[in-house]
Image (cartoon, rainbow, N blue to C red):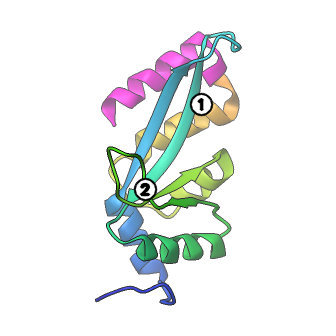
Amino acid sequence: MRIYANSIVNDSYLRGAMSFGAKPTISITKDSSLNVGYRVRLEIKLRHNIEDVLKVIQRKLLQLEIESTVKERESSHRPRPILIIRGIDNLDKTITFLDATWIHQFSYCLEVVKSGEHLTQSGLDEILREKEML
């Protein structure tokens, strides 16, 4: 079955595509402006060969009040289209309907970030431990 830009995606398709195709990303980068010296960024990424499929999924996510970004090319090394979900509220809404194996670790990291514990050394250490298990 092909999905085109004007297609409608039902909840089951969205749940399946996101649960089996989406990948969590936890980026930890050096940032001297923070007390612990590192910035934590949580994202969920979905890659697909056809950009229109990602745009249809993006439209369905928007109906669920989840904002996302679709890029035509992820990078020069990965020329495939990608859908990215960022932001605590958007990630929180997304993980409520996912049924992926990585949800437990990712939602724990999301809770650490929501509470502000990621700005402490112990919170950062917890995120690093969970990141290893993803």
Residue at the spot of label 2: 73
Name the residue at 48% across, 84% down: 5
Above or below — where is 32 with respect to 15? above
Q: What secondary structure is the magenta-colored segment mainly?
A: helix
Which secondary structure, mark 1? helix
Which secondary structure, mark 2? loop
Single out the mark in the foreground, 1 or 2.
Answer: 2
Above or below — where is 91 with respect to 110? below
Which residue occupies the extreme left position in the image?
1
Name the residue at 60% across, 23% down: 39
Observer-nearest residue: 44 or 124?
Answer: 44
Q: In the rendering, at what x and y percent does residue 134 appear? A: 34, 37
Could you say which quadrant of the image residue 120 lies in?
top right
Observer-nearest residue: 96 or 42?
Answer: 42
Is residue 121 covered in magenta? yes
Q: In the rendering, at what x and y percent does residue 51 appear? A: 42, 70
Please report the bounds of the magenta region as a residue range: 118-134
Name the residue at 46% across, 35% down: 26
Which residue occupies the extreme front position in the image?
76
Q: Are marks 1 and 2 in contact (CB under 8 Å)?
A: no
For badge 2, the amino acid type reads Arg
Q: Who comes first in sequence, dot 1 or dot 2?
A: 2
Name the residue at 47% across, 50% down: 44
Q: In the rendering, at what x and y percent does residue 84 appear? A: 51, 54
Quadrant in which the N terminus is drawn: bottom left
Q: CA distance from mark 1 to mark 2?
A: 31 Å
Above or below — where is 22 with respect to 38? below
Left or right of residue 1: residue 93: right
